[in-house]
Image (cartoon, grey):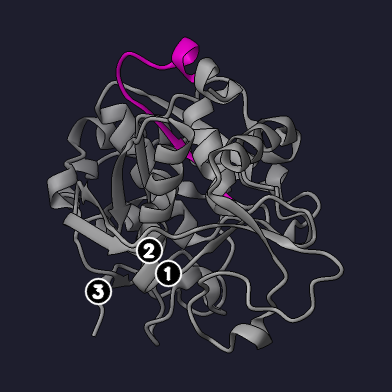
Amino acid sequence: MMTSERQFKQHRSPHYRGRFAPSPTGPLHVGSLVAAFGSFLHARAAGGEWLVRIEDIDTPRTVPGAAEQQLEALRRFGLEWDGDVVWQSRRQALYRDALATLQRGGTLFACHCSRAELDGRLHHGCVSQHRDGPFALRVRAPDEWIGFTDALRGPQRQNLAREVGDFVVRRADGLVAYQLAVVVDDADQGITDVVRGADLIDSTARQIHLQRLLGLPTPEYTHLPLALDAQGHKLGKSQQALALDAEHPLPALRAAWAFLGQAPDALAGCSTLAVTIDHAIRHFRLEQVPRQDRRLDAPEGGENPAAPSPAA
């Protein structure tokens, strides 16, 4: 059994343990605030712990100083976390252990395929004619349905062989892929509940498959609606994903609260950050969170975001 599983059993929380895991590719924006606020409230309303992990394993995309800016923004918005911040870039030994476990299990294989060779097709075994040089490591996708129940969206299922194909767990440049790193980290940190944006729901079946291969537990999953711009694009990927005004956190927190479908009266009269956070924790109701992605338009000039509206 891999090392991270033993550590998981030693450190597992007896109740609720959630997390927020941003990638340090830039400052926090209103879309990432929604994900952070939603996961924070879900954890605190359950009386649980809320951890922060910096997913900086993709070093070519990491922006120097961005992680520190993100952590400071979380503090300014009153989203205080438990314990020490975990950095993926410092956890290579755990990922190597996981790769060794997959290798011993016979589910891992070397792949030289380029995107051009695949030509948009699902990957089923290495088809490359060029077997020299760097290679990725992939996990064979099983031809079976993998299901889970999302706390917001209900039953979900996916057949990896038919819908995803063999997937990368270590890239050709030697970097560990997101799918493996997040599985190892969630288990090692004893995460019981994963609350994140709906853009990651398609990754869940792959992560559950890896959890089963590695003998790790599967947390509960909740996928929050995405904040969209006026054109229907994910706000984090658009030009409207403006950095948050951490000097004046209350307007953005109220906008995120409204976006999450929560009762506006719950925060009425809250004039300080501490009171706002306290009221939000006491009045948060997961069942009120919308299941569909929604528009959250950011006005021009870098002002705080406007109230949400349903996506067209």
Task: Check if mark 2's residue and mark 1's residue have beta carbons within 8 Å.
Answer: yes
Q: Position of residue 91 (x, y in %)?
A: 70, 33
The residue under label 2 is 160
Q: Which residue bears the numbered disc 3?
A: 309
Q: Residue at x 24, y 59 (%)?
A: 157
* Local secondary structure at mark 2: helix
Q: Nearer the viewer, mark 3 or mark 2?
A: 2
Secondary element type, mark 1:
loop
Badge 3 or badge 2: first in the primary sequence? 2
Residue, disc 1: 164
In the displayed structure, would residue 88 be above or below residue 31? above
Task: Please name the residue shown 56% across and 24% down the image.
Answer: 4
Q: Quadrant of residue 40?
A: top left
> Along the polypeptide, which appears first: circle 1 or circle 3?
1
Task: Determine the CA span between mark 2 and mark 1.
Answer: 5 Å
The location of residue 177, given as percent across then percent down, is 63, 54
